[in-house]
Image: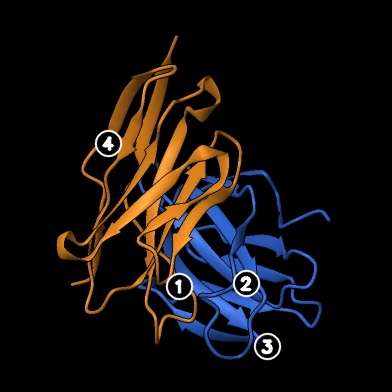
Amino acid sequence: AQSVTQPDIHITVSEGASLELRCNYSYGATPYLFWYVQSPGQGLQLLLKYFSGDTLVQGIKGFEAEFKRSQSSFNLRKPSVHWSDAAEYFCAVAGRTDSWGKLQFGAGTQVVVTP
Amino acid sequence: DAGVTQSPTHLIKTRGQQVTLRCSPKSGHDTVSWYQQALGQGPQFIFQYYEEEERQRGNFPDRFSGHQFPNYSSELNVNALLLGDSALYLCASTAGTGILTNYNEQFFGPGTRLTVL
């Protein structure tokens, strides 16, 4: 069965420290991969996406993600976290051939930033 | 550009009632998708509308239905509400090409928070 797993439900990080959020997927073929961020009262905002090519993808707000086919992973990273990065982060996938843009999301990782 | 807008922001209903949620897509977008996000969960795909027709549907019962209007706005209707229908309902729009829309970013609205008592 197709699935998206975010192993960490909750992460606490100090401001200025680095952040890594994990995402693993199970899919018939390599899907399109996305990371979204959701702040309270806000809709989901796309941080970055991977379709093909370079496995290290740069996104907005200083985020990057690395696609590792052998590990079926697409982990999100940020070198130095700001207090405004406190939010919920969702990894999502979409099939390349038949999904019509349908996104399948993980359960999310809540990020708390401490001073 | 107003982006994706949804109404109402919050809604409280009782079990057995019916509800209609509304979505206006981002300017230039013709494809609308609906997602249900239960508390502490990721969004779950309900269905997608393109050219006023339901193009794809997720694993939701027939109590969930929708409509798309000629101006591309959309409605989500839920009949016979259950307590488990309490969730944030998100609308997303994108510029469809009639084939795959994965290449086009989906823009999400802020959602409608539905509480069923």
Q: Amino acid at mark 2?
A: Val
For marks 3 and 2 on the same chain, the one whose residue lies earlier in the sequence: 2
Q: Residues within 10 Å of mark 4 (few under 14, many from 20)?
A: some
Estimate the spatial distance between the alpha carbons at disc 3 and disc 2, rounded to whole Å: 10 Å
Q: Chain of mark 4?
A: A
Quick one: which residue is furthest to the bottom in this view?
A: B98
Q: Report which residue position mark 2 lands on.
A: B32
Q: Point out residue A65 in the picture as x, y percentages from the top left corner.
A: 38, 50
Q: What coloring was used for the rendering?
A: by chain
Mark 3 and mark 1, same subunit?
no
Q: Chain of mark 3?
A: B
Q: Chain of mark 2?
A: B
For marks 1 and 4 on the same chain, the one whose residue lies earlier in the sequence: 4
Element on which disc 3 rests: loop
- Closer to viewer: mark 3 or mark 1: 1
Give residue A47's mark. Answer: none
Q: Amino acid at mark 3?
A: Glu
- Closer to viewer: mark 2 or mark 4: 4
Chain A colour is: orange
Figure quadrant of residue B85: bottom left
Give residue A102's mark. Answer: 1
Q: Nearer the viewer, residue B55 or A65?
A: A65
Q: Report which residue position mark 4 lands on.
A: A9
Q: Amino acid at mark 1?
A: Lys
Estimate the spatial distance between the alpha carbons at disc 4 and disc 3, rounded to whole Å: 38 Å
- Closer to viewer: mark 4 or mark 3: 4
Relative to residue A106, is residue A79 drawn left or right? right
Estimate the spatial distance between the alpha carbons at disc 3 and disc 1, rounded to whole Å: 16 Å
